[in-house]
Amino acid sequence: MTSPSPTPSPTPSPTPSPTPIARHPLTDEQRRLWFLQQLGPQDSGFNMYLNRRWSGPIDARALGAALTRLTERHQVLRTRFALDGEQPVQLVEPVRDIQVTVVRIPDAAEESFTAACAPFVNAPFDLGERPPLRAVLVSAGEHEHALSVVVHHIVSDGWSFTVLWRELLALYREEIGEGPAELPVLKLQFGDFALAERTRLDGGAAEEAVRLWSGRLAGVSALRMPLDHPLSPIHI
């Protein structure tokens, strides 16, 4: 009589690995903004925001899902800016669910919406702690709302902010079943542009530009502006 063969143990499922954090250099403009933010960490002057009134029902869960998909699509929206040694770098974080903060107010007066949005719009970002993006939905009942999306200028500008808003609406409509977003595939991310710029500048483009403009501006006299008082030589 033969002994029964031992039952093989099931092969354990592999543990999924976390998405690695991508690392990119900063563009020269980002380095300027990063440096100025370090000088005034409580300054919210570089915050950019879109405030939009919204009439009719709104789904906060679908809005958060649309924002999450937007950060998945645009890596720069889930990027934080931290020091690597003595140099700041872009660190692209894995995709995480974006939570839309919901604030309820008793009336739909414009002043009430503005007052409710103001703390979120004016709060400074810690660029090294987390990606500089937040959203708040202010609701006065079921049919009157204001949506505020806030980012730091280091990840956006006026033109790209309009793209962000257009794509957010398309993704939201898809989330609530109104039709596909049909957004084009992105071939490049902002980190690709930053890396290309750094490669070009490290290859001598910066020195070449200095030589070019030093030659063109040689001998040009100082521009005298009609100021109401002399400019102080000391800047604080």
Image (spheres, helix red, strand yellow):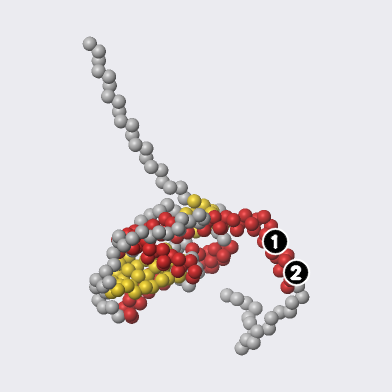
Q: Total number of numbered labels?
A: 2
Question: Disc 1 and disc 2: Cα gap in Å?
Answer: 12 Å
Image quadrant where residue 172 sits: bottom left
Q: Mark 1 is on which residue type?
A: Glu
- For the view shown, which residue lies furthest in the bottom direction? 228
Q: Vertically, is 170 above or below 217?
A: above
Q: Is residue 53 above or below residue 38?
A: below
The crowding category of the residue bearing disc 1, from other C-alpha atoms within 10 Å (few below 14, some 14 to 19, many at least 20), is few
| Left or right of 52, for residue 155 | right
SS category of the residue bearing label 1: helix
Q: Residue at x 30, y 80 (%)?
A: 109
Is 6 placed above or below 43 here? above
Expressed as whole percent of the image width and height from the top left, the position of residue 229 reads: 62, 87
Q: Quadrant of the C terminus?
A: bottom right
Of 8 and 80, nearer the camera is: 8
Q: Quadrant of residue 86?
A: bottom right
**Residue 29: x and y, percent?**
57, 65
Residue assigned mark 2:
215
- Callout 2 secondary element: helix
The residue shown at (27%, 19%) is 5
Tell me which residue sits at (63%, 81%) in the image.
Answer: 232
Which of 166/82 is in front? 166
| Amino acid at pointer 2 | Gly
Q: Residue furthest left?
A: 1
Which part of the image, by quadrant, shows the N terminus? top left
Q: In this view of the protein, can residue 79 be seen by the observer?
A: no
Residue picked out by circle 1: 207
The image shows residue 94 at horizontal and vertical percentages of 42, 52
Is 88 left, or right, of 101 in this rendering? right
